[in-house]
Image (cartoon, rainbow, N blue to C red):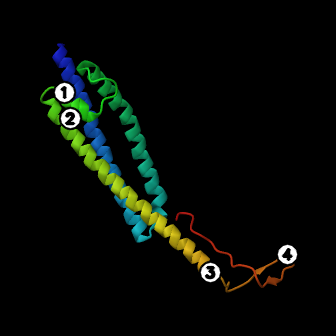
Amino acid sequence: MTREAVADVDYQHLSTLLWREQELLDLLLFKAEEKQYLILSGKTRWLARIAHEIEVVLDQLRTLEVERAAATEAIAVRLGTGVNPSLRQLAEAAPAPWNDLLARHHEALLVLVTDLRSLSDANRELIEGGLAAIGDALLSVRHPSAGTYGATGRSEAGSSRAVTLDGAL
């Protein structure tokens, strides 16, 4: 195999990894949108499940990132771009047609990551707002409708009412 053929294999491998990363980030975006729907609709029963599904995708991304870093380093050594170059730096140093393809991967990944950050921030605000509303509701309960019983078995006048919270919230 010629040196150019080996280089093409390395670029192809990196491109395949970048496509897979885009697919996983797109799936993560979908899962984040599902989570937002569940929060907005009050279907808290499914939040633990969607959180688990998000963790599975994140684990796949972490594994892929290690493989991508190794593929990037192999190309970086050949191009002389230094240790741990960014995808943009790699695209600028790569020969045609790989430079254009890597630049497009970079742009697509930036869009996905930006969308994910925005959606993640929105979900965090929704959850924090919900928790604040629950806290306000609990603080507004000052006069219990029914007393609780003390150690003597008698109703205690100044006692608070027992409250149960849904742990999924």
User: Which structural element holds mark 3?
Assistant: loop
* Residue at the image point whose x is 39% and y is 56% from the top: 120
Q: Which mark is residue 94?
A: 1
Which amino acid, mark 4? Answer: Ala
**In contact (CB < 8 Å): disc 1 and disc 2:** yes
Q: Type of residue at label 1? A: Ala
Quarter where residue 98 is shown:
top left
In this rendering, the label closer to the viewer, 4 or 2: 2
Kind of residue sitting beneath label 2? Leu
Mark 3 → mark 1, Cα distance in angstroms: 65 Å
Report the Cα–Cα distance between label 4 and label 1. Answer: 78 Å
| Residue under numbered circle 3 | 141
**Which numbered disc, 4 or 1, marks the residue that appears first in the sequence?**
1
Q: Nearer the viewer, residue 157 or 85?
A: 85
Q: Amino acid at mark 3?
A: Val
**Picture layout, residue 137 above or below residue 37:** below
Q: CA distance from mark 1 to mark 2?
A: 8 Å
Disc on the earlier residue, 3 or 4? 3
How many residues crowd mark 4 within 10 Å: few (<14), some (14–19), many (20+)?
Answer: few
Q: Determine the CA span between mark 4 and mark 2.
A: 72 Å
For residue 102, which numbered disc appears in the image?
Answer: 2
- Where residue 150 sits: x, y (%)? 82, 77
Q: What residue does disc 4 label?
A: 151
User: Which element is circle 1 on?
Assistant: loop
Circle 4: element type:
loop
Q: Quadrant of the N terminus?
A: top left
